[in-house]
Amino acid sequence: MWGGRTGALSRVWGLWPTGVLGRKPLSCNAASLEGNNSPHCWNCGGPGGPLRGDGFFCPQCSALQPPDPTRDHFSLMDCNRSFRVDTVKLQHRYQQLQRLVHPDFFSQRSQTERDFSEKHSTLVNDAYKTLLAPLSRGLYLVS
C-alpha cells in the first residue's frame, strides 16, 4: 500500500491519518473537521459523519475524500478569522497539510485519490498564499 520513499517519509513525519494502526493524528481543531460534506465515502460507501484527521480521510477505509471547495481558508489553515495571523504557525500548518495531501504521496493510489490529492493540495496552496500576504488576507476578509 504505502511503500518506498512515500511510506518512509510519512512514517518519519508521523502524519498518517488517524485510526489506522500505527498512524498518528495530525493535530487540528474543531473548525478543521468541517471540510467534507459528503454523506458517504466514495470508495467504501461507509457512513459519513466526522472524518479523521483534518476531514480528508474516510474513517472506514482511509481513502482520501473529495475536498470541499467552499471551505474557509482560515479554518483550513487552523487560524482565527482575523487580519492578524501568526505567519510561523501558518507556515507550519501549510507544511503539515502538504505532507498529508500532496500528490507525490498518492502516486501509488487510485486515479480518484490522485485527483482528490491534487485538488486538496491546490486549495492548501491557495489558502496559504492568500493568508500569508497582508494585502490578499485583508481582501479575503472583506470579500
Image (spheres, rainbow, N blue to C red):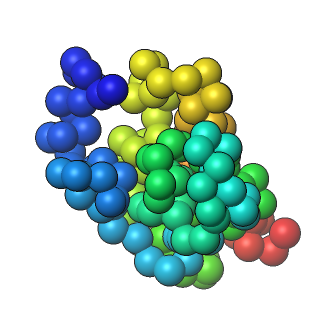
Residue 77 visible at all: no
- Which of the 4 image quarters holds residue 34? bottom right
In depth, the one of 141 and 46 nearer the eye is 46
The percent coordinates of residue 11 (x first, y second) are: 18, 40
Report the residue at 25% width, 22% height from top: 3
Question: Which quarter of the figure is the C terminus placed in?
Answer: bottom right
The percent coordinates of residue 59 (x first, y second) are: 47, 58
Rendered position, 66 above or below 113 = below
Report the residue at 24% width, 30% height from top: 7
Rendered position, 34 above or below 124 = below
In depth, the one of 64 and 72 nearer the eye is 64
Q: Is residue 12 left or right of residue 142?
A: left
Q: Is residue 49 left or right of residue 24?
A: right
Question: Which quarter of the figure is the N terminus placed in?
Answer: top left
In depth, the one of 83 and 125 nearer the eye is 125
The percent coordinates of residue 36 (x first, y second) are: 66, 60
The percent coordinates of residue 23 (x first, y second) are: 23, 52
- Which of the 4 image quarters holds residue 105? top left
Report the residue at 67% width, 44% height from top: 42
Rendered position, 9 above or below 92 = above
Residue 11 visible at all: yes
Q: How many marks?
A: 0
Q: Is residue 16 left or right of residue 136?
A: left
Report the residue at 20% width, 45% height from top: 13
Q: Is residue 58 left or right of residue 43?
A: left
